Image: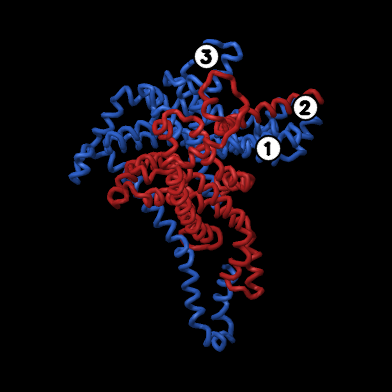
Chain colours: A blue, B red
Amino acid sequence: MTAVHTTDAAVPTNSSAPRRAAPDGAPRRRGGAFDQALPYLLLAPAVVAILWLIGWPVLSVVITSFRKLNLRELTRGEVVWTGLDNYTKILGDPEFWAIAIRTVVFTAIVVAASVVAGLLIALLMRQISPFVRILLQVAMLLAWAMPLLAATTVYQWIFDQQYGILNKTLVKLGFDSFAGFSWFSTGTSTLAVIGLLIVWQAIPFLAFSLYAGAIGIPKDQYEAAGIDGASAWQTFRSVTWPELRPLLLMVTFLSMLWDFKVFAQIWAMKKGGPDGGSTTLPVYQYLEGISKSHFGVAAAVSVVMVALLALLTFQYLRRLVRSQEGAL
Amino acid sequence: MTAKKITTNVVAVVVALLFAFPTYWMVATALKPRKDLLTGDYDLVPFSVTGSNFATAWSKPGFLNSLGNSLMVSLGAVLAAVVVGLLAALAMSRMRFRGRKGFVMLMLVAQMAPFEALLIPMFLMMRDLDLLDRLPALALIYFAVTLPFCAWTLRGFVNGIPLELEEAAMVDGCGRWGAFRRVTLPLLGPGLVATSVFAFVTAWNEFLFALSLINDQKKETLPVWLSGFQTNFGTDWGGAMAASALFTLPVLVFFLIVQRKMVTGVTAGAVKG
């Protein structure tokens, strides 16, 4: 690109230019205008798609949240503004708060568990022999590659009340009380199973990226720590941790984004049940919006959901945007 | 020293077994005759093996149909997202123009769009476009979901190819298009494959929009079909595991091919930019 611009700029100052430019001058000038328009032409489809399919829905969800929009209004095409009614309705509902708090706590536990386990496995991968490492990596790949719904179905089968292998194993080990034990009888134990499923599928990405980060740490730093006689824990504190911190922050941030919005596993497992006990904000939004056709209320739930997520990730988001601005 | 080494290796093997177990159990169950599944016996290893569960799943009404729907929607969306994303990536990475920073920022921000929170406006939009209960609605949404990721990740991969290579080709008489086609595009190959696979898996897995926008059973995608498996067929766990295994297989193959590239691609996209 740069080369083309330089030649173009050189043309007017070059004395032999007019003669040479005569036959191919016109196409070249056209090329110049084309060159200038080219980046915009290349970007246009993406920008149009993003503004239309993401930008407008973002705006629209905020607008819809101030409307009364049930099936009645939708079929009649009525526009009924209700101000903050949808918000006062959901924020005044204790059940909504129970669901919101459950979502935040669930996200926090799942993220913490998967990041810590991912880090431990990443560090473990550096210590083991190559054959075992490949074994571990293939095993993690199996978990990572299983589609969400396939994984959910497998977990339902493993935790099956009557014939699940887990209950059978526990009975075999002497815990007879687990014969016919129902893992899905309370919201908390249902969420525990779902959490385990999410962590199991989240760890591979975390472990692989943290392992990639860990092997990038210069060897001489460890050698220096070894010469100083640092213990394993001291080496971790003073070498591994500071080097891995930015990467850890990033994968924690990504995990929060992903886990806060989990829907498929929760819905497929017990549809938010029993008695709404495993309902989280995305499930609540689906129930209000699609099942009950309360689109205005559901839009307000979405806005609160995004606000909560922004609150959770605000600090990191700010740092990310600032660091990107410098790097652009 | 050696004792410690042995301990860590043993721990790693145990962790590996824990990770592999659900996959093993899926396949083992899928291979078991139905009568062996519903007994109280402890059956960690399938002693009699049958292919009948796979045959059942394959011939169940809905499976092949929803497999086809999923393939069509995912492939269509990803193909479009990769092409449009690549064009944008080339502009962002290779050209200098007014407003460039703004465009790059737009791609970064769009990548973090909370799609699950856009369920209601998307639903209303597809209703206005008369696309409810029609597969193009899903294709359009999956295109939008994967596009910012494709543009951003491909930008990272293009950045990794030295501009000097293209310039050298132009000095040697290639046009700009020729230089791109002969030098950059082949080097971009692995990046394109990795990006496509990751985007494909996102679309292949998607559940919320598929569940919300499609009512017609004939237009279900595979995840929705699988989530209804238990109610449709009682508790045919052998069939459910066989269907799950068939659902997993293509993704597993893709992952094995591009696993290494994917971690670098995704983390490079998110950190370095």
User: Which residue is disc 3 drawn over?
Assistant: A178
Between the residue at mark 3 and the residue at mark 1, the CA separation in whole angstroms equals: 41 Å
Specify the quadrant of the image occupied by residue A219: top right
Q: Nearer the viewer, residue A2 or A295?
A: A295
With respect to residue A30, does A160 lie above or below? above
**Is residue A250 in view from this perspective?**
no
With respect to residue A244, does A96 lie above or below? above
Q: Earlier in the sequence, mark 3 or mark 1?
A: 3
Q: Chain of mark 2?
A: B
> Left or right: where does residue B114 sit relative to residue B257?
left
Between the residue at mark 2 and the residue at mark 3, the CA separation in whole angstroms equals: 37 Å
Which residue reaches farthest bottom?
A19
The residue sitting at 60% across, 57% down in the picture is: B189
Q: Are marks 2 and 3 in contact (CB under 8 Å)?
A: no
Q: Which mark is residue B56?
A: none
> Left or right: where does residue A162 sit relative to residue A61?
right
Binning the other alpha carbons within 10 Å of mark 1 as few (below 14), some (14 to 19) or many (20 upward) gives: many
Q: Quadrant of the N terminus of chain B?
A: top right
**Is residue A95 in view from this perspective?**
yes
Binning the other alpha carbons within 10 Å of mark 2 as few (below 14), some (14 to 19) or many (20 upward) gives: few
Residue B232: x and y in percent read: 39, 33
Residue A218: x and y in percent read: 73, 40
Q: Are marks 1 and 2 in contact (CB under 8 Å)?
A: no
Residue type marked 3: Phe
Residue A118: x and y in percent read: 61, 32
Q: Mark 3 or 1, which is nearer the eye? A: 3
Mark 1: which secondary structure?
Answer: helix
The residue sitting at 50% across, 55% down in the picture is: B82
User: Which residue is disc 1 drawn over?
Assistant: A214
Q: Chain of mark 1?
A: A
